[in-house]
Image (tube, rainbow, N blue to C red):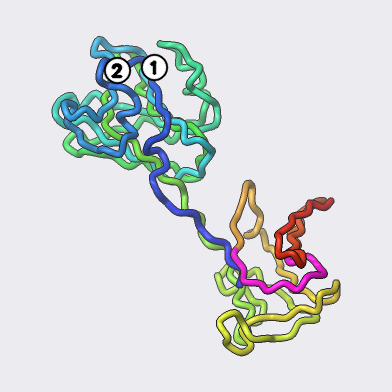
Amino acid sequence: MPVLLPAAGANVAVGKPADQTSTYPGGEPGRAVDGNTDGDYSAGSCAASPYQGQANVSWWVDLGEPYMIDRVVIFNRQDEFPERLNPFNIHIGDLNPFNIHIGDSGDVISNPRCGGDHHIDVTQPSISVSCPGMRGRYVVVRLPGPSRVLNICEVQVFPAIPRRVGLWPLNAEHLANDTSGGGNHGVAVGTTLAEGPDGEAQSAFTFAGNHQSYIEIANNGELDVKRSFTILLFAYHLGGQPMLDYRGPGAGTLFWIWPDRQLYIEYVT
């Protein structure tokens, strides 16, 4: 039963390397990704820049790898000066801001911006900013303008959870039809219904192990991907032919399981 699965939507910023354009003693950038959302600066869990102010002060985190981002949650300082955060920008991308110099926005603003100027309600401890469709390894919080002071007590980054785009039960009731609503119905050729992995009769397909035995799944555009997708299927492989053949324009991927029960991947053109 192949199905495209979503990724888990956990905070991927906690504990990751962080930096900022300048730091007030005791306000190290890593404090904003320590997992503590306490908005009292004296609790020692807030990042801060010097109180004298700086133009375009910025804070950023390295997620370690690129993510599709759903939203960024920022916890503001609550004991005093909550207005310092307004307005702020969020930049997300793969350009590394760790090589910038003090007072130089550098690669911070070269990464795409999520929306425009954001404003937090200063009576609230946090704000959630939606960034649908954005992707990147680095997430930057930037305070645009002259003489800005950074006080942020936690930044949480939540990756997007992709929607399911295909579900093929491959049983007597649904045959090779897509039951996800995506409309990418398949056609079974040279196959027979068989007992499935749960022991239920006619809840799986058996293949003959040759080019005349296959299930071909149509693609109305819903299955096109720019980066990656996840496929889950239950299969008992007896060898012979590829278990999965995914082909795009001019290239594709074959997945094999050999008699030694090892999975092999072959790229074909």
Residue stretch rendered in magenta on the structure: 232-244
Viewer-side residue, 36 vs 171: 36
Badge 1 amino acid: Thr
**Circle 2 SS class:** loop
x then y, percent, for residue 82: 20, 28
Res 154 → quadrant = top left
Is residue 243 highlighted in magenta? Answer: yes
Q: Is residue 54 left or right of residue 243?
A: left
Q: Residues within 10 Å of mark 2 (few under 14, many from 20)?
A: many
Residue at point 51%, 55% (across, down): 162
Q: Is residue 217 left or right of residue 156?
A: right
Q: In this picture, is 60 found above or below 207?
A: above
Q: Is residue 68 left or right of residue 156?
A: right
Residue that protrudes farthest toward the bottom in the picture: 201
Residue at point 49%, 22% (across, down): 97
Disc marking residue 21: 1
Residue for badge 2? 49
